[in-house]
Amino acid sequence: MIYNLESLTTIEGCDVQILKANEAKASLQLREMNKNAQFTNSERTLTARQVEMAELTSQLTSVVNEIAGLPEGMAKRKAMSKKMHIETEIFDLTTLMDSSTEYDTLERQLDLSEVQFKILCVDEFITAVLAKKTQLAA
């Protein structure tokens, strides 16, 4: 893309640059839409993980209460095994949630802001080329 408007000397040259800029803008708008979708999906995923964590915590509480009321034996060992399994799931889910929270959210927001800034720059370029085209037509 030509960024030096002084090098545009014909209306046809302006039209070509406007066409190229509109193509770039369409591509950027598609990227913006994808970034917005990714951001929305990550928020939904986080909410789903929080719901899953609440369910696991509830199950753990239930199993701990069950263990407290059981006599020594096979049923208690089975409940203890279930408790360990739930604790492992909670640990894995906590690790997953910790690794994909604030930093990833910030990174997605920065990516989206960058794309939006580029769209604004392309819009400004198109406006400048249209002004140059008007100047050349006069």
Image: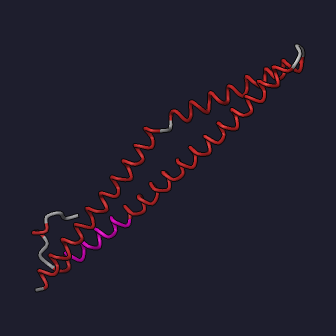
Q: How many marks?
A: 0
Tell me residue 99's x, y (percent): 50, 33
Task: Tell me what residue is drawn at x 36 percent, y 47 percent.
Answer: 110
The image quadrant of residue 89 is top right
Which quadrant, please, contains the C terminus?
bottom left
Task: Tell me what residue is drawn at x 85 percent, y 21 percent.
Answer: 69
Q: Is residue 66 magenta?
A: no
Residue 29 located left or right of residue 47: left
Task: Tell me what residue is drawn at x 11 percent, y 80 percent.
Answer: 135
Q: Is residue 23 magenta?
A: yes
Up the image or down, 6 lies above or below 46; here it is below
Is the image coloured rainbow, by chain, by secondary structure, or in one colour? secondary structure
Tell me residue 77's x, y (percent): 84, 18
Magenta stretch, residue numbers? 14-26
Tell me residue 97's x, y (percent): 55, 35
The image quadrant of residue 129 is bottom left
Tell me residue 59's x, y (percent): 74, 32
Which quadrant, please, contains the N terminus?
bottom left
Task: Tell me what residue is drawn at x 52 percent, y 33 percent.
Answer: 98
Up the image or down, 46 lies above or below 126; here it is above
Residue 88 located left or right of residue 99: right
The image quadrant of residue 18 is bottom left
